[in-house]
Image: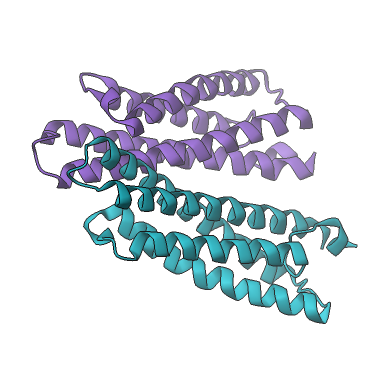
Chain colours: A purple, B cyan
Amino acid sequence: MAMDGVPGSLGTSVGFSLRLGQTLFSCASLLFMSLGVEFYSYTAFCYLVTIMGLVIPWSFTLALVDGYSVLVKCPVRQPGVLVIIAAGDWVLSVLTLAAACSTASVVDLLFHSGGSICSPKCCSRYQLSAAMAFLTWFLSLASALLNIWLLPSL
Amino acid sequence: MAMDGVPGSLGTSVGFSLRLGQTLFSCASLLFMSLGVEFYSYTAFCYLVTIMGLVIPWSFTLALVDGYSVLVKCPVRQPGVLVIIAAGDWVLSVLTLAAACSTASVVDLLFHSGGSICSPKCCSRYQLSAAMAFLTWFLSLASALLNIWLLPSL
């Protein structure tokens, strides 16, 4: 009943898709930021890389848990575990939003300051990285909200 | 009972203090950013000014409502009104966090790029503005959480 009532929470196929999306988008954000680009010269970009380094293992682990739960049809329903996961999602989504906003504003500043600092190719990579970080934030917020929604029904 | 159980929600003296703090900090952030400084040359700073222009009337109105409720000892307890206020707090706290992070990262970039763009006096004003925006975010998040907490007890 609770499992049918809240699609997207821990141990459902929608939840698995959300986790998979988070993992993919955060990996994409990290790759666009770090491959072949000197990201370590800007604090905001280092911060984004750090946060993505936290989000990727978190989302990947929970994607594995969700996938396993869907396969064995036995979702995790301990309130304590759900509270910890919801709190972790919450903290990570706030940090991801902060990283995405910082990156986007710095990219905007570099873009408008002329081509001397940032070549058009680099700038579009940074922009894509920021966009992926925003998508990661959105999916992470969805997971956090759906898990919190599930809590009162336990 | 509900009023005693959740200090800080709508119509209590703690809630009034939170709203007053939000109004003060957002006014301070706006003033530090806009007085005598050319803020309109950076997108992130314009965004901060826009968001503060939304937060100040919202917090001030709710501070008036809270103050009135405390004086007449008759707090608002309609679930519909509380949902609207909690949703508004929520959206504004996310926007405030985004504005604070953007401002902080741009200030950091300007600060480290040397004195040619931003004089030390201007930079410290920008930093103070970002710090005030973070404090506004924190108080706004507290209000949103406490109002959501109150909802199930109605």
Image location of residue A56, percent across then percent down = 47, 22
Asked if residue A13 is positioned above or below residue B84 in the image, the reply reads above
Q: Is residue A13 left or right of residue B47?
A: right
If the image is split into quadrants, where does the C terminus of chain B sit? bottom right
In the foreground, B95 or B56:
B56
Query: Which residue of the protein is positioned furthest toward the right in this rendering?
Result: B1
Image position of A74 (left or right of A143): right
Closest to the observer, A80 or A71: A80
Q: Quadrant of the N terminus of chain B?
A: bottom right
Q: Residue at x 35, y 58 (%)?
A: B47
Q: Residue furthest front?
A: B121
Q: Say if residue A5 shows up in the picture.
A: no
Q: Residue A15 occupies which quadrant of the picture?
A: top right
Q: Nearer the viewer, residue B27 or A132?
A: B27
Estimate the x, y position of residue A129 in percent, counting from the top left. Answer: 30, 33
- Please indicate whether residue B132 sits to the left or right of residue B81 in the image: left
Residue A80 point in image, percent of width and height: 77, 29
**Left/right of residue B100 with respect to residue B137 in the rendered view:** left
- Find residue B34 and report its horizontal and vertical position in percent: 34, 64
What residue is drawn where x is 46% and y is 42%?
A138
> In the picture shown, does residue B150 fall above or below A47?
below
Residue B153 position by quadrant: bottom right
- Residue at 34% across, 31% down: A43
Decide which of A12, A90 is in the foreground and name it: A90
Residue B23 visible in the displayed image: yes
Q: How many marks?
A: 0
User: Who's the residue at 76% across and 66% down the image?
Assistant: B13
